[in-house]
Amino acid sequence: MFIQVITGKVTDAESFRRMGESWNADVRPGAIGFLGSTEGTTADGRFVVMARFESKDAAAKNNDRPEQGEWYSKFESTVSDVQFHDCSTVFTMGGGGSDDAGFVQVMVGKVKDRAKFDALNDRLDEVEAAFKEWRDDVLGDVMAVHDDGSGFHDFIYFTSEAEAREGEKKDPPAEVVAIMGEMETATDIVEYLDLTDVMFT
């Protein structure tokens, strides 16, 4: 799987929403290698899109479609400060993303120690088992690592925001504390983005 993460600021909320509907109805049917997406906005007017494709080549071919180009030229007028992150390395837990999620939070991180980061991801089964025991409000997780190696976007799918907030209050077991300590030596979490008006396609 290949993921493209797109971020930026919304300058016209109503037009932004209409452009999302337009892409889903008019552009998506011919999208090459498109597997699905998660997109939403934050309370301070930013947006995040995580588009999944069969491969990087399929995503590139889709971007070259005239229909995609025409749509994007209109979409640009509704946003600013747009950034694209190509992510060929993808890690999933709990089956990945879930369209049943009532709340999605995105952790934006930087990689401090790539060797430790990779070693931790090589133990995903262990990490998943430990976190599942602690947080049953988490339905799934998709981490997209930027191809330039600088960082990642980690999409976490929750049953609901209320249950997520309650889950945050629970003390983690010793094995989770140990794993989180390893994460802190390998990465820095820059910010947490709470997505509202989430749409799954």
Image (spheres, helix red, strand yellow):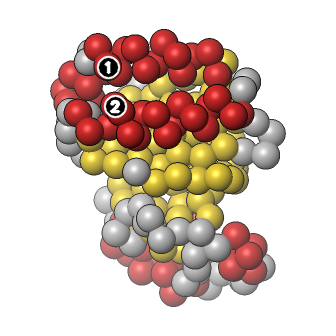
Callout 1 amino acid: Glu
Asked if one can make out residue 42 in the rendered structure from this viewpoint, the answer is yes
Q: State if disc 1 and disc 2 touch (CB < 8 Å).
A: yes
Q: From this view, report whether residue 107 is shown above or below residue 54.
A: below
Q: Secondary structure at mark 2?
A: helix
For residue 31, what is the image quadrant? Answer: top left
Q: From this view, report whether residue 28 is shown above or below residue 193.
A: above
Residue at which label 1 appears: 67
Pinpoint residue 97: horizontal percent, then vertical percent.
42, 61
Quadrant containing the N terminus in the rendered view: top left
Pinpoint residue 190: horizontal percent, then vertical percent.
68, 41
Which class describes the residues within 10 Å of circle 2: few (<14), some (14-19), or many (20+)?
some
In the displayed structure image, the side of residue 127 where residue 75 appears, left or right? right
Asked if one can make out residue 186 in the rendered structure from this viewpoint, the answer is no
Q: Residue at x 64, y 22 (%)?
A: 78
Q: Residue at x 27, y 47 (%)?
A: 35
Pinpoint residue 26: horizontal percent, then vertical percent.
35, 33
Give me the C-alpha separation between circle 2 and circle 1. 6 Å
Between 175 and 125, the one lying in front of the other is: 125
Pinpoint residue 179: horizontal percent, then vertical percent.
53, 68
Residue at which label 2 appears: 27
